[in-house]
Image (tube, rainbow, N blue to C red):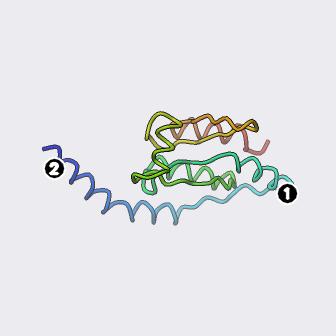
Amino acid sequence: MKSVVRYFFRTLRVLLGPVMLLKEALTRPQGVVRTSAEQASVDAACRRLALYQYKTCPFCIKTRQEMRRLSLDITKVDAQHAGPARTELLQGGGQTKVPCLKITDAAGSSRWLYDSEKIMAYLRSRFAPA
């Protein structure tokens, strides 16, 4: 029974995934316009951030849309399949749940923030124009 359920959801993901990606591409929001100096400062701060995500996860898509809205160039790491990225997510954050924002401070220590709403609130509080 467990394999039947797994097969059902895998098939559903294969069928709906391209539709979700198309919708994301068609509904791209306009980004915030900043001066070149302000954008350079934001880009420098974004180098300390990484979003662990799955390509077709609806919560990840919502988070990526918010990143576009705020004109943030945050590294996106695909953690869907077994590999080093998924292992790093599990070891660093303690879970393989996505989306997850890895926040590295100036000292090099990392904090892992889960949940799309919390991630978007963090990004807005830090990068939204006044």
Q: Residue 119's quadrant in the figure?
A: top right
Task: Judge the density around disc 1: few (<14), some (14-19), many (≥20) Cα neighbours within 10 Å.
Answer: few
The image quadrant of residue 21 is bottom left
Nearest to viewer (mark 1 / mark 2): 2
Q: Secondary structure at mark 1?
A: loop
Residue depicted at x 19% and y 47%: 5
Residue under label 1, please give it. Answer: 35
- Quadrant holding the N terminus: top left
Type of the residue with mark 2: Val
Q: Specify which label sits upstream in the sequence, 1 or 2.
A: 2
Q: Look at the numbered disc 2 and give the secondary structure of its residue.
A: helix
- Residue 11, given in percent of the width and then of the height, sits at 25, 59
Counting from the top left corner in percent of width and height, residue 9 is at 26, 51
Which residue is depicted at the point 31% across and 61% down?
14
Q: Residue at x 63, y 36 (%)?
A: 110
Residue 42 placement, left or right of 119: right
**Horizontal side, residue 111 vs residue 81: left or right:** right
| Marks 1,2: beta carbons within 8 A | no
Seen from the viewer's position, the closer of residues 100 and 90 is 90
Which circle marks residue 4 in the picture? 2
Q: Residue at x 65, y 37 (%)?
A: 122
Category of crowding for the residue at label 2, using alpha-carbon neighbours closer than 10 angstroms: few (below 14), some (14–19), many (at least 20): few
Q: Nearer the viewer, residue 120 or 88?
A: 88
Q: CA distance from mark 1 to mark 2?
A: 54 Å
Q: Residue 59, image x and y in percent?
A: 47, 46
Count of marks overlaid on the render: 2
Locate the C terminus by quadrant.
top right
Amino acid at circle 1: Thr
Which label is found at residue 26?
none
- Frontmost residue, 120 versus 53: 53
Picture coordinates of residue 37 (x, y %)?
87, 55
